[in-house]
Amino acid sequence: MKKQVNTLWGAAFAEQPGASLIRFTSGRDVAPVPPADQALVPYDLWVNTAHTVMLAKTGIISPADATMLLRGLATLEEEVNAGKFTLDPQAEDVHTAIELWLTRQVGPEVAGKIHTARSRNDQVVTDMRLFLRDQVINLVCNGLMLLETLIELSDTHKSVPIPGFTHHQHAMVTTLGHVFAAMASMISRDLKRLETWYELHNVSPLGNAASFGTSFAIDRTMTAKLLGFDGPDNNSLDAITNRWEPEGDLIYAQSVLMNHCSVLAETLILFSMPEFGFITLADSFCTGSSMMPQKKNPDVAELIRGKTGRVYGNLVGLLTVLKALPLAYNKDMQEDKEGMLDTVYTLQGALQLFAPMVATMKVNRERMRQAVNQDFSNATDIADYLVTKGLPFRQAHEIIGKIVLYCIQNKRYLLDLSLEEYHQFSSLFDQNIFEVLQPEHVVNARNVYGGTASNQVAEAIVRAEDVKKEAALWYDSYTAKNK
Ligand code: ARG
């Protein structure tokens, strides 16, 4: 018996949708959004801990006070992990909430010392930087899984000819493998872009205090090390003003990644239309209609396309809110969080479904073969053929134009004509024209670096594999470092 799901459709579906599909496709229709600072709680605890350790090691607070503070923070961490710590809207923000909690736990005398030599201004930048860094690492992980799927598909289908389209019209023959290799090339750049984020922004803002540093003899290198940063950042004014660049760089990287996914999503939406019939998406990545029982809608692919706009919106929102502020802290900066978090949640949902959706689709090779046999996507190849026989390309182009018109008028395709018919247009044609026009020949003739030939696609796969290996090593080293 089929599993019962809470939907108004699904009787015609062989597989039922999973909870993650429903969550993603219903979007914000029914889902509440947690408070922005909720995401910063674990990072604020970590920053508090590192700061306390440093205050004790530098002699700014006593070991006894530090021990009480660290015990308090450890207890709070247990509460957080048990889901018992909720943010009180009256407590203003996560930093205030945690300090108030500590005050209740260890008393105002000791708790009041934790904020020595710092401000909420450097605290929030540091919390956010740690949060962003984890997102970069998660994205590299998801990007790697997607890249692996694309590499596999590219390899499997590197000799499967399909029509290539420009202007939504049949243009030249390509292969399904070449299409996936193109996507793999895009995702390879996404991985490198994310790694660059880390190189640029993995520095510690802690110790810049309100915007002007502190008179206490703190050790910024120590806290940077404790928090897994490569070192402290350079200038306290720059650091506190910089509430948008790491965020913006990451939302931009995510925008590009979403764009790449949306290109493939749109291609798959088209290819799954009955008029194409090239692919069939698995039931578990589609939804149905509450009215038309036969409908199977590619909702996941459509939402990846749609949510790309939402991610761009978040980027433009951030850039606009944070523009033209004077140096140092301004309250406008607090507005940097929601768009960032919305982008992160959007990407998490999209990437969780995208790679498996692509991996589980059914490829209908016969329909693809039919499409390349019944079109003129090999026309350029006859023109090229005549050029190799000495005709200028422009003349060859005109002759082939006439042949195509002849075919259309007689309801034939280029491979259906006889050599005698070809001779009516040019005496340069030989029997081997029929070999030249075969889709496999057309594809393999484009044996140029990056081209459609199956050996070129195989080389593109090797290049993508290299990026994958390098990104996997990067991922392993950074996850090990940030444990
Ligand atoms: N919640 C604040 C923010 O995100 C923390 C910093 C508050 N600083 C201040 N000077 N009011 O910006």
Image (cartoon, rainbow, N blue to C red):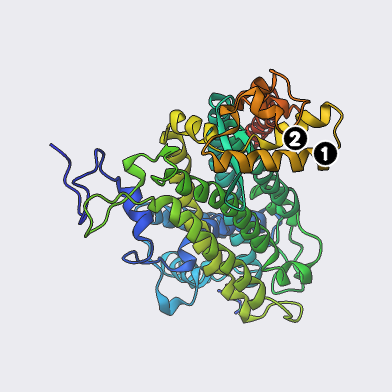
Q: What's under tag 2, amino acid-wise?
A: Ala
- Quick check: can you spot residue 448? no
Residue assigned mark 1: 393
Disc 2 on helix, strand or loop? helix
Of the pair 408 and 482, the residue shown nearer to us: 408
In the rendered view, would you say 189 is above or below 224?
A: above
Q: Quadrant of the N terminus?
A: top left
Disc 1 on helix, strand or loop? helix
Q: What's under tag 1, amino acid-wise?
A: Phe
Relative placement, left or right, of 322 versus 155 is right
Q: Residue at x 68, y 25 (%)?
A: 444
Distance between mark 1 and mark 2 Cα atoms: 7 Å
- Quick check: can you spot residue 309? yes
Q: How packed is label 2: few (under 14 Cα within 10 Å), some, or many (20 or more)?
A: many
Of the pair 64 and 184, the residue shown nearer to us: 184
Residue 299 location (% of width, % of height)? 38, 53
In the rendered view, would you say 88 is above or below 261?
A: below
Q: Residue furthest top?
A: 431
Give the label on residue 421, or none: none
- Are dots 1 and 2 in contact, CB under 8 Å? yes
Q: Quadrant of the C terminus?
A: top right
Sequence-wise first label, 1 or 2: 2
Count of labels shown?
2
Residue 195 location (% of width, % of height)? 69, 45
Residue assigned mark 2: 383
Residue 125 sits in quarter: bottom right
Relative placement, left or right, of 196 versus 40 is right
